[in-house]
Image (cartoon, helix red, strand yellow):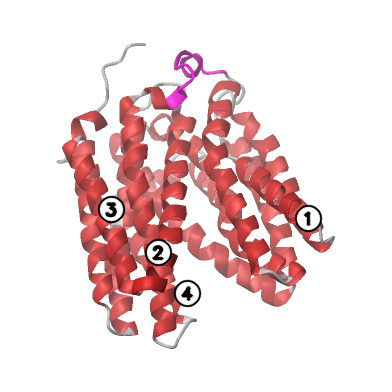
Amino acid sequence: MAVYARILRAPNVAVLIAATTIGRLPFAINGLAVVLFLREATGSFAIAGLTTGMLALGSALGAPLVGRLVDRRGVRLVLPLAFVHAAAVLGIWALGAADAPTVALAATACLAGAAFPPTGSVLRSRWPELLGEPELVRGAYAFDSVMIEASFVGGPLITAAIVAAAGAQFALGVSAGLVIAGAALFLAALPGDHGAIAPHARASGALGALSVRAIRMIALTTLPVGFCIGTVEVAVPAFSDAHGSPELAGVLLALWSVASGLGGLAFGLRSTDRGLTDTYVLLALLFPLACLPLAAASSPPAMALLVMLAGAPIAPLIASRNELVAAVARRGTGTESFTWLLTALVAGLSAGAAVAGVVIEAEGWPAAVLLGTAVAALGALFALSRRDALRPEPATY
C-alpha cells in the first residue's frame, strides 16, 4: 500500500483525485435520480426509461467529440461543459415538473450526457506527467479504476438518501452542483497551461484518436466486456426476483463493485514482469471465466460469493486497458483516446442489458449470464488473436 501513499503525496494529486471523484458522482447519481423523479412526475416508467436511455446515449456519442475539443482547445473547457451539463440536468427537473413533451425531456437528457466534462479522461492522460515513475503511474491507473467503482457504489447511495430526505428532484439539484464543483476544483489543482492547443491532435485528421490502430482495437475489445457486464447487471435482479427477494439485487451488485475495487487495489501492487499487452489480454480471458459460475448459483449466499468472484477482475481489466491506452495514444489525443473507451463500454452495456431482458423472458436468467459470458469470451479470443495490433506503433511524429 506504500505505492498508493506515495501517489497521494505527490503534488496536487490528492486534490485532483478528489475533484474527479466529485465530478464522477453525478454520472452515477443521474440515472437513478432521473428514473425516480420522472416516474413520480409523469407517472410513466416508459418516459423515465427513455429519458435515462437518452442520457446514456448522449454520453456515449458525445464523449469522443468533447474529448477531442478538450485536446485541441484546452482543459479549461471542462468548466463551461460542466455548466452546460448542470443546466441540462436542472432542465430535466423543470421540464418534468411542467409536464413537458417527452421529446423535450429526451433531447435535454441527450444534451446533458453529451456535455459531461471529461475530467477523468484528462487526469488519466496526465498521470505520466504528474507522477513520472512507472511504478506510481501503474498504481495510479489501478487506483483510478477503484475510484470509479467507489463512485458507482456511492452515487446510488447518495441518491437514495436524498430521495428519502427530500425527493428525487433534489438529487438532480445536488448532481448539478457536484459536477460544477468537481470541474472547478479540478482546474484549480491541475498544473500547466489549461488553454494550450495540442498540434498532434490536429495532425491526427478526421479520425482523431482512432487513427491509431491500437486505440481502435482496444475500443473494439471493450465492447464485449461491456456486453457481459450489462447482461450480469440485468441477470442479478432477475435472480433476486426469482428467489423472492427483489431488494437483494442492490446488495449483490454492491458486492460485485466492492470485489472489483479490491481487485483493482491488489492489481496496482503487482510486479512488472508481464508486458502491458499480455496483461490486458490475460485479464480479458480471465473475466468471462470468472463470470461463468454465476449461471450455476442456486441460492442467495452462493450468488453473493460468485458475484464477488466475477467482480474481482473488472477493475484490473479497466486499469490494464487504461495503461495500454496511455502507452499507445498519439501525443495530443489522450483525452479523446480515453473517451472512446467510455463510448465502447456504454454501447456494450446498453446492448447487453437490452438483449439480457429478452433472453431472461424467454429462457431465464442463467441463459443471459451464459450469453454474456460467451460474448466476452469471443471478444477475449479476438484480442488474443490480434494482440500484435494492440502494441504501440513506431512514432511518426
Is disc 1 surrounded by few (<14), some (14 to 19) or many (20+) residues within 10 Å?
Answer: few
Q: Secondary structure at mark 1?
A: loop
For disc 1, the marked residue is 101
Q: Residue at x 27, y 59 (%)?
A: 373
Look at label 4 and name its amino acid: Gly
| One can see residue 33 in this view | no
User: As shown in the figure, which amino acid type bears the numbered disc 3?
Assistant: Ala
The residue lying toward the viewer, choosing from 105 and 125, is 105
Mark 4 crowd level (few <14, some 14–19, many ≥20, 10 Å Cα): some
Mark in front: 3 vs 2: 2
Q: CA distance from mark 1 to mark 2?
A: 30 Å
Identify the residue at horizontal 59%, vertical 59% (top origin).
31
Residue in view at x 38 percent, y 52 percent: 226
Q: Is residue 283 above or below residue 118?
A: below
Mark-to-mark CA distance, 3 and 1: 39 Å
> Residue 52 is drawn in which quadrant?
bottom right
Under mark 2, the amino acid is Ala
Which residue position holds label 3?
A: 376
**Residue that label 4 marks:** 250
Q: Is residue 310 left or right of residue 334?
A: left
